[in-house]
């Protein structure tokens, strides 16, 4: 079946299987920034934004996003670079596998909350697992990023 | 997941007709559980254009469309205004934001998952389920219904009453299923106690409720007694997450705490 949607504001139309998941569709079309980790709706590595909201792309069917706007990290490059700098400053990452999904979640957090508390930040990023670094250094990096503007 | 057809329903009538065509045709809610169990499906029926993603209210009730996501539900001002925010809080305990932006309230209910925080969060209240075609059933009756109901859940009706609520999920890590969960309410002066994931599904502790509702001015000792009754009347089992004995002890602690909390 054919499905059309907006990928970082560019309309695309792909031939997909009815049971195909968005992460697989995007990766098969070269969007390798979408990373599949657990592939069980848990780790959050595959997170991207659908209509501005973070979702796990390993668990959302491509057919269900007909006409919607999808944002991957390529669509928020400037913000992702800022987030990356703060992560580096705080020692909040190591292997970097989870960073792309996390960057998109942090970007969505910034859009949704004006002045989030530590608790709100933790609750927002809890669905993005990081096996290398610590949650506290990530929270510190996020707070620094949110203060930037 | 193997799916033969993705069907975009044009109306509820159209969706219902498609659902009856083949026992392997299923309604798509969030789709998370279908993925989890790798279910083989003939046709996935998409209801997303039928306007089932809205929350509305009138004087008597709040009406939640079955395709409202868990995230929309927990952030709704209307839902947060009910019973001290206990229902919204229960949903907030499910996985992460990126999960709850997919999972729907209707999907959580229709699956009757024994681990469901959404169900344990709603069961202490007067909640009715509206199905297409022409069927209304209380949440409690639906949970006890034997067999598969081949209708379409359209909306969840939550009665607006004066009262307070409590919800507690006991879990090992932030993203775990509950070891056990509890919902307690005091609505119009009457207590309701719910225990879920024992690991069997959410159920009202009727003997404990009967006891505490018949005490004129309950004290802490009465709450303790009611919690002990709940722990003895319900069946608990062992699984990889916890033993039956541990769940029973948790019930004694959290039912008492819940009864005290709803009196504040």
Image (spheres, rainbow, N blue to C red):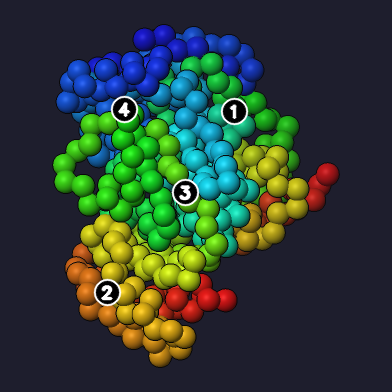
> Residue visible at 51% across and 46% down?
B61
* Quadrant of the frame with the C terminus of chain B: bottom right
Marks 2 and 1, how far apart at CA: 48 Å
> Residue visible at 38% across and 46% down?
B128
> Residue visible at 21% across and 28% down?
B40
Camera-side residue: A4 or A136? Answer: A4
Circle 2/circle 1 CB separation < 8 Å? no
Q: Which residue is mark 3?
A: B158
Q: Which residue is mark 4?
A: B133
Marks 3 and 4, how far apart at CA: 20 Å
Give the structural element (helix, strand or loop) at label 1: loop
Lower position in the chain sequence, tag 3 or tag 2:
3
Q: Do marks 3 and 4 share a subunit?
A: yes
A103 over A17 or under it: above or below: below
Q: Which residue is mark 1?
A: A51
Lower position in the chain sequence, tag 3 or tag 4:
4
Give the structural element (helix, strand or loop) at label 4: loop
- The quarter of the picture where residue A22 lies is top left
Marks 3 and 2, how far apart at CA: 24 Å
Whether residue A144 sits left or right of residue B127 in the image: it is right
């Amino acid at each position: 079946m054919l499905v059309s949607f907006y990928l970082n504001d560019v309309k695309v139309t792909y031939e997909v299987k009815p049971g195909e998941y968005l992460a697989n569709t995007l990766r098969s079309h070269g969007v390798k920034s979408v990373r599949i980790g657990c592939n069980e709706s848990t780790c959050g590595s595959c997170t991207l934004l659908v209509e501005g909201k973070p979702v796990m792309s390993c668990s959302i069917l491509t057919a269900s996003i007909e006409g919607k706007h999808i944002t991957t990290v390529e669509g928020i490059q400037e913000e992702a670079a800022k987030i990356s700098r703060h992560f580096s400053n705080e020692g909040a990452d190591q292997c970097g596998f989870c960073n792309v999904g996390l960057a998109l979640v942090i970007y969505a957090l910034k859009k949704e909350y004006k002045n989030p508390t530590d608790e709100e930040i933790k609750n927002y990023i809890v669905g993005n697992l990081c096996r290398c670094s610590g949650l506290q250094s990530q929270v510190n990096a996020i707070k620094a990023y949110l203060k930037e503007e | 997941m193997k799916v033969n057809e993705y069907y975009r329903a044009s109306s509820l009538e159209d969706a219902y007709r498609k659902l009856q065509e083949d026992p392997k045709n299923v309604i798509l809610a969030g789709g998370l559980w279908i993925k989890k169990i790798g279910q083989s499906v003939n046709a996935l029926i998409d209801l997303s254009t039928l306007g089932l993603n809205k929350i509305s209210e009138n004087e008597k009730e709040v009406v939640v469309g079955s395709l409202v996501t868990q995230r929309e539900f927990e952030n709704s001002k209307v839902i947060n205004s009910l019973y001290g925010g206990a229902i919204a809080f229960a949903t907030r305990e499910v996985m992460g934001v990126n999960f709850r932006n997919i999972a729907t309230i209707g999907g959580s209910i229709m699956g009757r998952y024994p681990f469901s925080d959404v169900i344990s969060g709603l069961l202490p209240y007067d909640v009715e389920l509206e199905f297409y075609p022409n069927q209304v059933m209380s949440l409690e009756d639906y949970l006890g219904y034997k067999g598969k109901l081949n209708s379409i859940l359209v909306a969840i009706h939550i009665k607006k009453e004066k009262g307070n609520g409590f919800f507690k999920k006991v879990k090992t890590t932030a993203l775990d299923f509950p070891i056990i969960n509890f919902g307690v309410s005091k609505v119009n002066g009457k207590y309701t106690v719910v225990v879920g994931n024992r690991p069997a599904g959410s159920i009202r502790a009727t003997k404990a409720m009967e006891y505490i509702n018949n005490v004129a001015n309950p004290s802490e000792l009465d709450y303790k007694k009611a919690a002990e009754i709940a722990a003895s009347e319900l069946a608990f089992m062992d699984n990889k997450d916890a033993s039956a004995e541990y769940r029973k002890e948790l019930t004694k602690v959290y039912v008492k705490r819940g009864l005290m909390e709803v009196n504040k």
